[in-house]
Image (tube, rainbow, N blue to C red):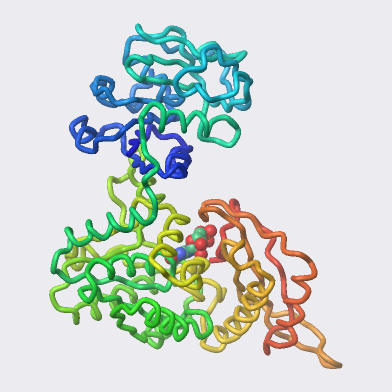
Amino acid sequence: MILIIDFGSQYNQLIARRVRENKVYCQIEPPDIAVATIQELQPEGIILSGGPSSIYEKNSPKMDKAVFDLGIPILGICYGMQYMVDALGGKVQHARKREYGFAELKIKNPVGVLKEADRQTQCWMSHGDSIVSLPAGFALTASTANTRIAAIHNSRRKLYGLQFHPEVEHTPQGKKMLRSFLFDICGCKRSWTMRSFARDAITRIEEQVQHKRVILGLSGGVDSSVTAVLIHKAIGKNLTCIFVDNGLLRKNEADKLKVTLKQHLKINIRFVNAAARFLSALKGVTDPEKKRKIIGLIFMEVFESEAAKIRDAEFLAQGTLYPDVIESISAFGGPTSVIKSHHNVGGLPARMKLKLVEPLRYLFKDEVRRLGKTLGMPDELIWRQPFPGPGLAIRVIGEITRQRLQVLRNVDELLLEEIREAGYYKKLWQSFAVLLPIKSVGVMGDARTYENIVAIRAVTSKDAMTADWARLPHSFLARVSNRIINEVKGVNRVVYDISSKPPSTIEWE
Ligand code: XMP
């Protein structure tokens, strides 16, 4: 495994991705990790990430310098390199000019991480400080026009530094450089696959849980379903899942999920129909935040009372993913552990005195999908688009009534049918309809109509942090609009949302 020390770079997750693409496991840890912990983890190599700080700032992140004496190969990137140089007696200085963007890298000595790279190549720079003198034992290996010391090595101690970012696409030879580090220098093996991950995860769950009971809030989404299957493989009938139907799901969703989950997963699932309770609490509520609060609260109550029926449950399983974990352990003052509110069970573990089981906490979304595939799960579960916990409540803008939910469900069903048919479902991050709280005038046959407006939202995204509206073909939008207005009673106008995130959000509320 490779240990990545998080000095706060926005590219940290990308470094982890690059390492894992090579079938090598890696973990991101904060700079204050104890050297003893590093020794226990036994990493084959360590990557010190970049970061926004200057090492001369008072609160810039630092780590125990003893890390350089462990005999473990280390690659410092940007701030990570400057930190290494400073720690070992070299000198870093504020550059007169900040260097940001492309630069032409000239490799003078193709050794270490630069061994396989082209002698002249493009690289991506983003730094304010520069190295002006090297610590004893180090030598220069590459330069750019503005940065004389762009790459360094101390091959005897297996310490390497790059001032630029090898992990980004803008450094085309970066992948080769990282591969040289992983395989030539650290001697890693390409042994980390989803099969091996599943095997290890199952063993860990068995050890953690033993013969105790685990409960899991199943939403029907990818993360909670994969979590369920994995835990089920480890402890079988000692896992009980609870699925709460809040009356805010898509058309026939609850029934379809019942079939898919029961048939394919063969897991013990308790279905709770709490639709009436949610809808009556939401009556007359139009404020988005209020809607969320009410839904979150009732979910907790319903879940808690259902869970109370499961005697001696000691653990609560959650489908927390790595990006949430990384955000919460970032070098810059985040809380040390965050419980994801995604499935609206955020406050539960503390309230119910349950211990957490989070077997996906080191995986990225696409890895979770691959894991699901490895575990034999059907595509229709693995490739589901994300669906928000508050469901259609935040897509019926304004007041939620059964009748308005019905209109939205009909539109949404038709839209998804067309999206699937045209082969867009997997390509889009999300696609859905929104029912607006205003009416507009239309004409149908010879008669005037005064009916609802629906908006169609379709976005592409990697992680929902940013999103772009999908450039769906006009012919497709025309067909969908036609069908909706002709087939769904109560709608006489369709609009397409062409806003990106930021500054808009994916959902309307
Ligand atoms: P926004 O609208 O903030 O959404 O751009 C980002 C992603 O999060 C989903 N979302 C939620 N998921 N509970 C959830 O479980 C929520 O309250 C919630 N609000 C938004 C949204 O669908 C998108 O994927």
Q: Nearer the viewer, residue 123 or 285?
A: 123
243 vs 111, left or right, is left
Figure disc tally:
0
Residue 286: x and y, percent?
51, 74
Name of the residue lying farthest toward the bottom: 446
> Where 211 sits versus 143, above or below?
below
Question: Which residue sits at x=72%, y=64%?
Answer: 472
Which quadrant would the N terminus be assigned to in this image? top left
How far across and how far down the image is residue 149, in percent?
50, 13
Q: Is residue 430 left or right of residue 195?
A: right
Residue 118 vertical placement versus 95 (above, below): below
Q: Residue furthest right?
A: 446
Q: Give the residue drawn at x 50%, y 73%.
A: 380
Examine the image and state in which quarter residue 369 appears: bottom left
Along the viewing direction, whichever of 492 and 242 lies nearer the viewer:
242
Image location (x, y in percent) of residue 357: 25, 60
Q: Position of residue 101 (x, y in %)?
A: 61, 27
Q: Quadrant of residue 187?
A: top left
Direction from residue 58 to residue 221 in the image, left or right: right
Please name the residue shown 24% across and 35% down the image. Answer: 42
Q: Residue at x 27, y 65 (%)?
A: 317
- The answer to whether 359 is drawn above or below residue 110 in the figure is below
Q: Nearer the viewer, residue 99 or 492?
A: 99
